[in-house]
Amino acid sequence: MGRDLDLEYFKQRLEDRLAVIKAEQEAARGESAPRELDQECVGRLSRMDAMQQQAISRAGARLAGQERQRIEAALGRIKRGDYGYCMQCDDEIAEGRLRVDPSSLVCLACAREAENL
């Protein structure tokens, strides 16, 4: 690597966040099961609210799964020795960007270019 990144710092941050995500996913497993609603006691709005809450839970689980994949990939890059390099242009990712999001895949220039597409 062309610069001195504190890889232990980034590895610890990634592992800490991964542990939180895993704990949240484990806790959510029981909550995401479909709930039976008593049709006689629950009105139409309550059913709609329950369906909306389930949709929100599924979306949150999807986002957490994507973050988990990015974190696991970043940990793999640390092991391989190519952490901190842009997956698009192979330039170094700014340390400040990595401090904000240690699982960043691309440099700021490539991120901006992708937003303009």
Image (tube, rainbow, N blue to C red):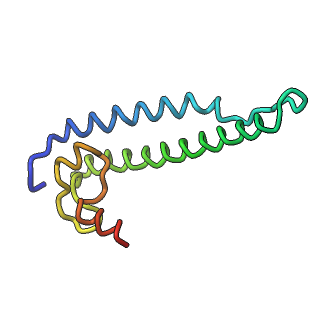
Is residue 33 shown left or right of residue 66?
A: right
Q: Residue furthest right?
A: 40
The residue lying at 80 percent from left, 32 percent from top is 36
Q: How many marks?
A: 0
Where is residue 22? Give x, y as percent.
Answer: 47, 33
Is residue 63 shown left or right of residue 33?
A: left
What is the quadrant of the C terminus in the image? bottom left
Where is residue 40? Give x, y as percent.
Answer: 90, 29
31 relative to 14, above or below: above
The residue lying at 83 percent from left, 33 percent from top is 43
Relative depth, front residue between 49 and 61: 49
What is the quadrant of the N terminus in the image? bottom left
Relative depth, front residue between 88 and 2: 88
50 relative to 76, above or below: above
The residue lying at 55 percent from left, 42 percent from top is 61
Q: Residue furthest bottom?
A: 117
Relative depth, front residue between 83 and 45: 45
Relative depth, front residue between 91 and 52: 52
Where is residue 93? Give x, y as percent.
Answer: 20, 56
Quadrant of res 101: top left
Where is residue 86? Give x, y as percent.
Answer: 25, 61
The residue lying at 27 percent from left, 47 percent from top is 79
